[in-house]
Image (tube, rainbow, N blue to C red):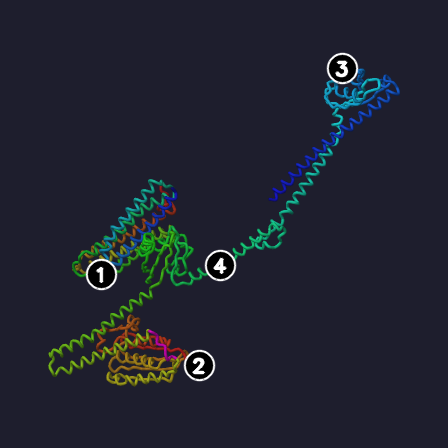
Amino acid sequence: MKKRIFIIYLALVLVFALAATLLASTIVLSVARNNLITRLQTEALQIENAIKERGLDAVLEGLISPSRVTLIRPDGSVAYDSWANEPLENHADRPEIKDAQNEGTGVAVRYSQTTKSTAIYVTRAQADGNVLRVAAAERVARGIANSMLPWLIFGLVLLVIFSAVFARYFSGRLLRPITGIDLAKPEEAVVYDELLPLVKKLDEQNRENLAQLAQLEASRQELKTLLEGMHEGFIALNDKGAITLMNPSAQRMLGVKAEDARGRLLMEINRSQAMIDLLSALQEQGSGEGMLQMDGKSYQLFASRIDGTQSAVLIISDQTEKTAGEAMRQRFTANVSHELRTPLTTIRGCAELLVNDMVKPEDQAQFYQKIHQESQRMLTLVEDILRLSSLDEGYLKGLSEQVNLYQVARESCQTLELLAQEKGITLSLTGEDAQVLGDAALLGELCTNLIDNAIKYNKEHGRVDVQVENTPLGAKLTVSDDGIGMSKEHQEHVFERFYRVDKSRSKETGGTGLGLSIVKHAAEVHRAKISLESEDGQGTKIVVGFPAVQKEG
Amino acid sequence: MRLLFDAQLQKLNSEMIIMGSMIEQAIKTAGELLISRDQDTAMALKRGDSEIDRKEREIESLCMRMLLIQQPVARDLRVISSTLKMITDMERIADQASDIAEILTMPLHGAVIPFPEQLQHMARETALMVNRAIDAYVKRDADLASEVIAHDDVVDGLFTQVKENIVALINEDHTKDSMQLLDMLMIAKYFERSADHAVNIAEWVEYAVSGLYKGERLQ
């Protein structure tokens, strides 16, 4: 733009300058010619006067003039010519001669046959009828004009240089307000009113762009936080099936870093059958589902093509706990059905025999006893299950109550004293008062179950020691026995529902298999920690550590 | 033309990964069968072999088409020609797995002799080698490929131990079902062969990546 303005400006100046020079030289030429004519006229007058004073011959003899002086007789023949050496032809038809003969004077500019150049002729008619002609070559006038030319050219060059400098400065100055517009703040420093609408529009657009950019950044950040924070793995695939995005969860699950995975096929990262099936389902149907088993974990996979594109997203969700939970629930249901059916079968069998009168009268009492026993067992079982499910739903009431753990343990011991005596087991309680924040009934359940187990799974004349103490960490309940104990492999499972170390003993001891499950739940409700130490045949020690009671105020 | 070629190369790559996944699973399952002796799994493994054979033919014809129509040079040619060699080895591994399953579905005479721990170890190592060889292909990782090649000595060592175990079993009690002991030797040999095929795959991976086969430039 600047260059263009500069060139146009300079060209304009050049054209005008040239035109002016041309005009000036034309004017100079015409002035010089007029001057020459005047000079010639003066000269002619002077010669005429000289002839009048001194006579023709004297004048012609002493004539020294740069001009050509010719005297023409009235008939047109040349009487004298200062330049021509040979006699000249008749000049009567020359226009300047005719003019002089008719009007007294004449002027002509024409090509001269004699001098072979353009010449200026001035004529005067003499009193005797002769015509005096004074002539000079036109180049004399041109010479005068030409002598002015260097000055003209000098002026022209000066003008061009000056214009160039000026044009440069001027074009820069003209454009500075435009080039100087700060695009971030265009409304400042506007010099031309003509630019105002443009600048306003620019400003408007600037604001709009900034707002959109901020919005875009915000939503990008939002998406990033969302993807990074989600537990599920998220993978985006482009139209070629290469990974474009992988969130931290997906990286963790598939054991790969995002920078290593980007641009590679998902199949290259994980080529398990589940993944290959999922990808082919995605390609054929546009979506797919599957379960991926890897490193002892189960992942659920969902893949779906994004509408209208060949890109796709894949979600991986960790189902390990859910699957394990489901398996445990299934086991529980199966166990419950089994445990309920066993006594029911006995009851039905006995009842059937009694109804059909197939029992000897003396044996009937024994059958009634059996039915009573088994129904009692079922009732206990159902009660235990109900208690467990109420714990499952969240046993939260009454936790603000301060309970003396020692008191609770003593009550449990008193209840079970009889059972212990029956089996010849020594039950002892030691320790001190210890405050626990919780539910008295639930704590009673916990103590009773622990002590009950210790008595049941004991040997004859064994002992059970119950100890309650205060520690800096909080109250601690220890129940230890020198009974049958259990091996390491069973220790992991004893807190599971219906788990039995020795399945053949279940009838004999009369347990439901839910005792330690209730203990575990009760402990969880009280945020207590359970630890178990046992060895096969060496007895068992269970420690329940309660959290410290926060002093009020 | 190049666009089509690139698409074909990509297809070749994913087909190879799929086939790799199949044989990897096959040899792993064969190893697991040594413990479980599950008849259904063994039958499924035998049936799966034909699918792997089909995959091999698919890849082979894809390679042929690419060689004939595209006439690749340099690296592309190396990738395709090594793929042609690799699928043969891969198919052989699947065959060995199927043969192992075949042995395990045959009726037994006499008491079951449990497989020696060394043989189970050997099966695990072989499955690992196959897995690593496929990994090396997927990642175009020459270092991993040379690791696989070096690992063959471990499997060979285990094979010798298994043979000694079997000899000890024979000497220990002549009343044993000798057929089972022979089968045991066969199974061990099949695993040992599979490991050799894994080494071959790794060597072809090296060639595809570096242009050197067993450290030499092929003419």
Q: Which comes before the other along the chain, label 4 or label 3?
A: 3
Q: Which x, y percent locates residue A449? A: 29, 79
In the image, which is nearer the foreground, mark 1 or mark 2? 2
- Marks 1 and 2 close (CB-CB < 8 Å): no
Q: Which x, y percent locates residue B208? A: 36, 46
> Are callouts 4 and 2 both on one chain?
yes
Q: What residue did someone put label 3 on? A: A90
| Disc 4/disc 2 C-alpha distance (Å) | 51 Å
State the SS at label 2: loop
Tell me: B198 left or right of A47: left
Viewer-closest of A24 and B94: A24
Q: What residue did someone put label 2 on? A: A551
Q: Quadrant of the N terminus of chain A?
A: top right
Question: Mark on residue A477?
Answer: none
In the image, which is nearer the foreground, mark 1 or mark 3? 3
> What residue appears at the point 34 percent right and 45 percent down from the top-left corner?
B80
Question: Mark on residue A215?
Answer: 4
Tell me: A170 left or right of B193: right
In the image, which is nearer the foreground, mark 4 or mark 3? 3
State the SS at label 3: loop
Instruction: Say which amino acid is labelled 2.
Output: Lys
| Disc 4/disc 3 C-alpha distance (Å) | 107 Å
> Are callouts 1 and 2 both on one chain?
no
> To which quarter of the image does residue A170 belong?
top right
